């Protein structure tokens, strides 16, 4: 059977290593004494500088950039006709690209030779497009030959593989697709099943692939289109849907977030008498989906059945089942049982990635139940047993804070100091909290009298020194802003003479890359595609870059924002929360300028210029609220850049003398006018305390007032840490931290607001 060109594989291309030179051996006369030359250390490789416009389109294609990005193929062809490109090769590229894109491959036939000779187009893309032209010219063998050139690691491999099928007989196509499906990526399932179904001629084959559509692609258009035929075959006794099929379908529905559909459909298939693998999978999917639609009481039964009956059958489901069941119990305020479930994760599944989470969350629930010793024990176990866990710093923080609250300040400081050995990546906020509070406890050690200084001058000065280091090394963080307030009181001159870190004060205009990365083939290909305006293809080359390195995250964003500014910024925004300036490695300012743009800042200044708070504070708020997406609607119904709830928007708009409706609330200027006026109202309500005003923007002024009354008299930093809502605690820190970062970035120097009036109380007296 002729399948080789369809199912071909190709070894990945190696990185070009032509720059490595092997020294030529010198011949030496036999028995001649030779002294060994002194070892020569090779010079360290120099970093490679790339211009900030590394993703720019070829200047000669610039007039066509918007048309290429929007895939307006007919617009491209019209523009070529009215304004021809003087460069012949670029003209050929753009003409062929637009003709094939618009479905006019036959008109590209005269350009075949010129297309094949282009030297600036990536070879696999060139081959794919050549195959379309040869196919239009009915040159089957040449088309097949071009498809064979496309290697397996190419992003065009799947398309080439599918295109190659059309040269086979119907039976050969069927066999090729049949062999492809079992190992296909889920993203290919729809494509394969759409192609294979018309080739399935026997009733048995048709039922098999209809069932695959039913289980792998539930609720999709393909499933809807084929549902009647599947039902007709199921009406015959020879065909049935097995329990394993039901489990596959349940998991597919769950992965597609179709929780309501799953719970409605599967209520009749639940049977807890027999713990088979299929049943365990169905129970988990059913229980998780019930939880997702907030049927937390009903979700407990299937989830606890998974934990009790399925440990040996589906061990991968036990830990998440405990976790979700515990979350459901928390919603019901059954914290003791929730803590027991959380602690069951590290006890029964000690090697699971959720094991350390279990200890942290159990400790929180024991704390809520006012069992601090059990909470402290859980956090100590987490730190000791899972020193590489992703929640390690939160464990350190909760342990230290609660030891301090219990009057064990020295032990709290000891644990906080140990946390400094943990790498600064991932949980940045808790890492900075531990540094700030460790210093504070040295200066003000009494939890009951948190503004009473330590009589030990030496320890107190050690705390001051820690704060100075925090402000100098990490000046952009929320906790550095807090530290600076105390230093304005205790060491104003030492704070004043702090110098900015070199990464902040050193001007940078070009991206600096490691030489090994600069030579990567995927970077070269990405730049090839971006120079042609083919941003989608450029992005396909580099998704693996975005895992850890902030430089690569920023470069990816710089490219992606050409086609989607909102999504690009939002992804970088969330990713940079796991890193801290000063620890980027290189390219600090360029990364910050990419991640903290001045989008909408001019409008913010216009609408808030007469208010008491700095405009940059409100600008920071909208970055954290909406990630600069003017059309965003939250799960709770908050709308637009300022994330206004409908009732608040209408109420505050009246103060400004205009009305809003479902459409106008998304107008950036009106939305920002309302949001800034509301923030001014909150500043008035809390006597100018930005910490409380920002908290109230998230949780409501009633809640912030209640918490202040509950914990007063207390300093502002204490109040923030005691806010019961995790979301609001994090929100205050993110917004004010972003304000601090923007302020430092704007001045390229150390700068801190003067909010010392909140050092020892939440509101000015």
Image (cartoon, helix red, strand yellow):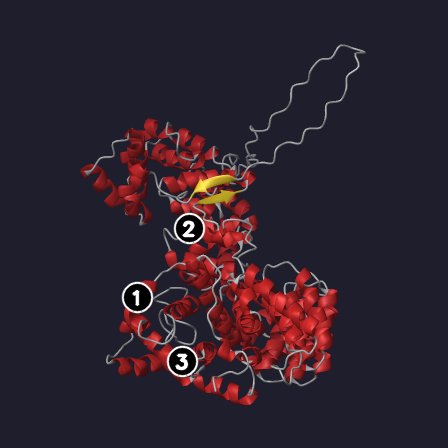
Mark 1 and mark 3: Cα distance apart in space: 20 Å
Report if the CB atoms under discs 2 and 3 are less than 8 Å apart: no
370 to the left or right of 609: right
Q: Earlier in the sequence, mark 1 or mark 3?
A: 1
Report helix, strand or loop for mark 1.
helix
Viewer-proximal residue, 116 or 162? Answer: 116
Mark 2 vs mark 1, foreground winner is 1
Mark 1 vs mark 3, foreground winner is 3
Task: Look at the image and tell me whether residue 584 can be seen.
Answer: yes
Q: Residue at x 21, y 42 (%)?
A: 78
- Residue 558 marker: 2
Q: Earlier in the sequence, mark 2 or mark 3?
A: 2
The percent position of residue 479, horizontal first and vertical second, equals: 55, 69
The percent position of residue 323, horizontal first and vertical second, equals: 63, 72
The residue most toward the front is 493
Categorize mark 1 by other alpha carbons within 10 Å: few (<14), some (14-19), many (20+).
some
- Residue 603 marker: 1
The percent position of residue 347, horizontal first and vertical second, equals: 74, 70
């Amino acid at each position: 059977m002729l399948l080789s060109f369809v199912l071909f594989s190709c070894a990945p291309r190696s990185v070009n290593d032509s720059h490595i030179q092997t020294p030529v051996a010198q011949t030496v006369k036999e028995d001649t004494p030779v002294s060994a030359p002194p070892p020569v250390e090779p010079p360290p490789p120099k970093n490679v500088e790339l211009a900030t416009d590394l993703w720019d389109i070829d200047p000669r294609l610039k007039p066509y950039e918007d048309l290429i990005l929007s895939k307006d193929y007919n617009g491209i062809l019209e523009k070529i006709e009215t304004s021809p490109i003087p460069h012949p090769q670029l003209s050929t590229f753009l003409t062929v690209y637009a003709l094939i894109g618009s479905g006019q491959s036959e008109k590209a036939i005269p350009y075949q030779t010129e297309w094949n000779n282009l030297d600036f187009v990536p070879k696999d893309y060139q081959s794919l497009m050549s195959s379309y032209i040869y196919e239009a010219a009915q040159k089957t063998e040449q088309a097949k030959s071009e498809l064979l050139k496309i290697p397996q690691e190419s992003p065009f491999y799947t398309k080439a593989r599918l295109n190659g099928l059309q040269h086979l007989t119907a039976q050969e196509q069927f066999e090729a697709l049949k062999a492809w499906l079992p190992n296909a990526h889920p993203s290919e399932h729809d494509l394969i099943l759409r192609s294979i179904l018309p080739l399935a001629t026997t009733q048995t084959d048709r039922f098999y692939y209809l069932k695959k559509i039913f289980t792998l692609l539930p609720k999709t258009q393909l499933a809807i289109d084929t549902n009647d035929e599947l039902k007709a075959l199921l009406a015959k006794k020879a065909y049935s849907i097995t329990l394993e099929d039901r489990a596959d379908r349940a998991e597919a529905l769950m992965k597609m977030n179709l929780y309501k559909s799953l719970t409605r459909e599967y209520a009749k298939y639940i049977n807890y008498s027999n713990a088979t693998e299929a049943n365990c999978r169905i129970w988990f999917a059913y229980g998780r989906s019930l939880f997702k639609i907030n049927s937390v009481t009903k979700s407990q039964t299937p989830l606890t059945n998974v934990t009790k009956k399925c440990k040996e059958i589906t061990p991968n489901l036990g830990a998440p089942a405990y976790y979700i069941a515990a979350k459901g119990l928390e919603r019901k305020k059954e914290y003791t049982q929730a803590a027991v479930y959380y602690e069951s994760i590290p006890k029964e599944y000690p090697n699971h990635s959720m094991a350390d989470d279990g200890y942290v969350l159990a400790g929180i629930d024991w704390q809520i139940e006012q069992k601090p010793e059990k909470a402290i024990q859980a956090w100590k176990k987490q730190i000791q047993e899972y020193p590489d866990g992703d929640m390690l710093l939160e464990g350190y923080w909760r342990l230290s804070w609660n030891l301090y609250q219990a009057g064990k300040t020295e032990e709290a400081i000891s644990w906080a100091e140990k946390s400094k050995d943990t790498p600064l990546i991932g949980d940045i906020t808790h890492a900075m909290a531990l540094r700030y509070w460790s210093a504070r406890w040295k200066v003000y050690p009494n939890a009951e009298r948190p503004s009473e200084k330590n009589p030990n001058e030496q320890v107190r000065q050690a705390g001051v020194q820690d704060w100075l280091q925090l402000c100098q090394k990490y000046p952009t963080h929320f906790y550095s802003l807090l530290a600076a307030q105390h230093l304005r009181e205790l060491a104003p001159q030492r704070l004043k003479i702090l110098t900015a870190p070199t990464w902040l004060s050193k001007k940078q205009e070009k991206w600096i890359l490691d030489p090994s990365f600069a030579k990567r083939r995927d970077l070269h290909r990405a730049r090839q595609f971006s120079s042609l305006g083919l941003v989608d293809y450029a992005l396909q080359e580099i998704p693996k870059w975005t895992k850890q390195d902030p430089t690569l995250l920023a470069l990816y964003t710089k490219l992606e924002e050409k086609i989607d500014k909102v999504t690009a910024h939002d992804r970088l925004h969330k990713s940079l929360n796991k890193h801290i300036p000063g620890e980027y490695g290189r390219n600090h300012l360029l990364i910050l300028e990419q991640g903290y743009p001045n989008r909408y800042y001019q409008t913010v200044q216009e609408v808030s210029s007469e208010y008491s708070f700095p405009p940059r504070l409100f600008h920071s708020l909208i970055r954290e609220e909406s990630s600069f997406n003017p059309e965003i609607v939250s799960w709770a119904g908050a709308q637009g850049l300022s994330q206004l709830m409908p009732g608040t928007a209408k109420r505050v708009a009246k103060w400004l003398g205009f009305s809003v409706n479902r459409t106008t609330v998304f107008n950036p200027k009106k939305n920002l006018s309302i949001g800034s006026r509301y923030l001014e109202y909150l500043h008035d309500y809390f006597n100018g305390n930005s910490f409380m005003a920002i908290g109230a923007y998230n949780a409501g002024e009633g809640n912030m007032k209640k918490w202040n009354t509950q914990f007063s008299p207390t300093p502002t930093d204490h109040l923030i840490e005691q806010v019961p809502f995790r979301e609001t605690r994090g929100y205050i820190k993110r917004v004010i931290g972003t304000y601090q970062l923007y302020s430092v970035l704007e001045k390229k120097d150390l700068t801190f607001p003067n909010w010392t009036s909140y050092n020892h109380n939440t509101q000015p007296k």
